[in-house]
């Protein structure tokens, strides 16, 4: 019996026809889906390392009882912690309904301009909302002001509410506010997913993500960060506070998941971030059948959010599996808006694992399983495995259940999630990619993905606009001369992979299932807007661009005036020489949405073009699918040419 897994090692390569597929995130050659051999299992026989000595291990009654008690309503653990939980609820330590802040509600209204004709408060409250995350940053605060000038209802998502309140109510932000505009404020830390409340996203139809980790000159800066913001003179930089991994990758992932959970869009929701999942795993090993394997699950540290499934699998005493499983979840998980699960993994060591989803709350009942293969990667490499819901098959104690005895998986009714490493496959077959011994599988996310975009947006405005950076694809690009590149490319590693994690965040946005746009500005400056534009794809341009130009584009895009931005990733700069400041001439004003649309059309901006390097080859201005097809054609050409001499 072969596995349901095929491999996909770079975004844009053609998908395998097998139900589940894997993609290497960094640094590997493309491989074909391996054909998995199968071995018939005899009683007491187990696949393992060659020469593994069979020793009788002592079975642990204590571990057996502990595992059963964990899944029987919480057992001794819940009894022992009951006083703590009771006191916690009394003093408000246990999170229940969101509490209002000292300043007012979860969402605070800072400013409201009465519409022409007297738009009432009730009508304004029901108007569509544009959320700006990172609203106190250089680009973010300009997005807020520009959107207000267009009459939008803007909700600012910030970490420091007091700072934002003072900054955003200043005259330079509100003076140009158009009738009907409204400014709202909510506080959350995007690196901490529990702070992103559903109430923050109520009524939100568009999100602008202008967040970034904090970079500052090593020599220090002014209170207003003048050295950093000027963008022309170089100061030796350093990361201050949270890392790029925590903010630029983890933060964007959390923001996307929270937004999509409220929209009810399947793609992008991280199952591990759903209530009770990551913290609800407990060991369920072969100790329940006399074995001596051991495992555990722990929540990964901040900035590397997810789960670590680790332990040791032993084949003695007719055992041979280790697993972790959640207690029954309340409420149950409704994953039906998606097509399957996408796991971002590291540390799999080439072994074959299983994921099981359960819809029956009984402890020993039919579950739905799918096996997936992992790759042997270096410590800092990650891969992605996609497992369609259609590939999960009903099983009971590792035996498949006939179709007439069990329905297909209902992803809208998931009560438990389980991960397993086992020497057994199904129906008596052995796992051909099993090794006994220690293991550690790191799972950064378990996203619900959808085939194609699922939010129903056709034309008009992108749901999610992400402000990235020019240069994100250049670190480790073949043939690139780093000395000729901007400082961020040269210092990428020294700055904690600042561009690497922005690129990973872009990938999250592009595969989220939301209509989107990724804009990559060149060096950002405080100059006037209006300099001649350079719009490009393929990530090759250098130069500078005013923050106000970027804000002008974003406002036009989310107002539905730049349809060419839908699904696009592009770089934005100007023709202005780097050391020469640009000053707007008399009568020059902000670009209109029509002018932005014309600029993108002139540059032939196309969806799917990223400029990434896939399988060691730079894709330039091709989509990744086009690059893969070109590579296959190139590989065939020498073989086909011999007979044409």
Image (spheres, helix red, strand yellow):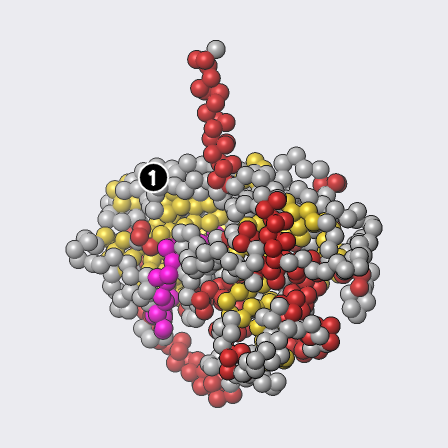
**Where 164 falls versus 566 (above or below)?**
below
**Where 574 falls versus 240 (above or below)?**
above
Residue 241 seen from this side: no
Residue in the foreground of this view, choosing between 174 and 222: 174
Name the residue: 63% across, 39% down.
477
402 lies left or right of 272: left
Question: Quarter of the image holding residue 609?
Answer: top right
Question: Quarter of the image holding residue 527?
Answer: bottom right
Q: Residue furthest top?
A: 645
**Quarter that holds the N terminus:** top left
Using a 10 Å C-alpha cutoff, classify the residue at mark 1 as few (fewer than 14 neighbours), some (14 to 19) or many (20 or more): some
Residue in the foreground of this view, choosing between 603 and 331: 603
**Where 645 falls versus 538 (above or below)?**
above
Q: Which residue is mark 1?
A: 36
318 lies left or right of 454: left
Q: Position of residue 327 (x, y in %)?
A: 36, 69
Name the residue: 48% across, 53% down.
511
Residue 333 on the magenta segment: yes
The range drawn in magenta is: 326-345
Residue in the foreground of this view, choosing between 311 and 401: 401
Name the residue: 49% across, 63% down.
257
Q: Residue furthest left?
A: 404
Q: Position of residue 44 (x, y in %)?
A: 27, 48
Q: Position of residue 115 (x, y in %)?
A: 59, 78
Q: Position of residue 95 (x, y in %)?
A: 49, 79
Residue 561 on the magenta segment: no
């Amino acid at each position: 019996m072969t596995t349901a897994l095929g491999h996909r090692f770079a975004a844009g390569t053609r998908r395998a026809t097998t139900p589940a597929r894997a993609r290497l995130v960094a640094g590997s050659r493309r491989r074909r889906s391996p054909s998995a051999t199968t071995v018939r299992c005899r009683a007491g026989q187990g696949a393992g390392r060659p020469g593994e000595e069979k020793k009788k291990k002592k079975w642990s009654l204590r571990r057996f009882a502990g595992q059963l008690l964990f899944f029987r309503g919480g057992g001794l653990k819940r009894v022992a912690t009951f006083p703590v939980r009771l006191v916690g609820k009394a003093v408000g330590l246990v999170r229940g309904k969101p509490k209002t802040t000292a300043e007012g509600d979860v969402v605070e209204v800072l400013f409201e301009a009465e519409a022409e004709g007297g738009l009432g408060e009730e009508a304004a409250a029901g108007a569509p909302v544009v959320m700006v995350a990172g609203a106190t940053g250089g680009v973010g605060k300009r997005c807020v002001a520009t959107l207000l000038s267009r009459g939008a209802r803007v909700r600012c998502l910030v970490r420091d509410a007091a700072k934002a309140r003072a900054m955003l109510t200043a005259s330079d932000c509100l003076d140009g506010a158009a009738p009907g505009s409204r400014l709202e404020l909510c506080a959350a830390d995007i690196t901490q997913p529990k702070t992103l409340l559903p109430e923050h996203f109520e009524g939100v139809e568009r999100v602008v993500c202008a967040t970034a980790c904090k970079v500052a000159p090593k020599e220090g800066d002014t209170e207003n960060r003048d050295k950093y913001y000027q963008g022309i003179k170089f100061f030796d930089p350093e990361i201050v506070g949270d890392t790029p991994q925590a903010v630029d990758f983890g933060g964007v992932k959390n923001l996307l998941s929270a937004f999509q959970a409220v929209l009810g869009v399947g793609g992008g929701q991280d199952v591990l971030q759903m209530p009770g999942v990551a913290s609800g795993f407990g060991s369920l090993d072969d100790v329940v059948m006399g074995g001596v394997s051991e495992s555990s699950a722990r929540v990964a540290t901040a900035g590397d959010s997810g789960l670590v499934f680790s332990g040791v699998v032993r084949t003695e005493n007719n055992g041979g599996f280790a697993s972790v499983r959640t207690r029954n979840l309340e409420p149950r998980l409704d994953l039906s808006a998606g097509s399957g699960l996408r796991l971002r993994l590291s540390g799999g060591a080439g072994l074959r694992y299983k994921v099981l989803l359960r819809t029956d709350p009984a402890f020993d009942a039919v579950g739905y399983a799918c096996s997936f293969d992992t790759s042997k990667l270096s410590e800092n490499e990650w891969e992605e495995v996609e497992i369609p819901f259609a590939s999960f098959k009903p099983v009971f104690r590792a035996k498949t259940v006939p179709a007439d005895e069990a329905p297909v998986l209902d992803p809208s009714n998931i009560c438990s999630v389980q991960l397993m490493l086992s020497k057994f496959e199904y129906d008596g077959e052995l796992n051909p990619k099993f090794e006994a011994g220690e293991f550690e599988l790191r799972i950064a996310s378990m996203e619900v993905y959808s085939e194609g975009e699922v939010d129903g947006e056709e034309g008009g405005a992108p749901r999610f606009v992400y402000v990235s950076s020019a240069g994100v694809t250049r670190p480790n690009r073949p043939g690139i001369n780093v000395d000729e590149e901007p400082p961020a490319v040269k210092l990428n590693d020294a700055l904690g992979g600042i561009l690497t994690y922005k690129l990973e965040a872009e990938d999250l946005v592009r595969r989220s299932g939301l209509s989107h746009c990724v804009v990559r500005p060149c060096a950002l400056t405080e100059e006037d807007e209006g300099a001649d534009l350079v719009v490009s794809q393929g990530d090759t341009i250098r130069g500078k661009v005013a923050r106000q130009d970027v804000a002008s584009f974003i406002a036009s895009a989310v107002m539905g005036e730049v349809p060419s931005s839908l699904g696009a990733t592009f770089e934005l700069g100007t023709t202005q020489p780097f050391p020469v400041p640009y000053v707007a001439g008399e009568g020059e004003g902000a670009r209109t949405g029509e002018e932005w649309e014309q600029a993108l059309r002139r540059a032939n901006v196309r969806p799917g073009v990223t400029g990434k390097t896939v399988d060691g080859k730079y894709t330039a201005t091709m989509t990744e699918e086009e690059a893969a097809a070109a590579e296959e054609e190139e590989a065939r050409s020498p073989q086909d040419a011999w007979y044409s001499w």
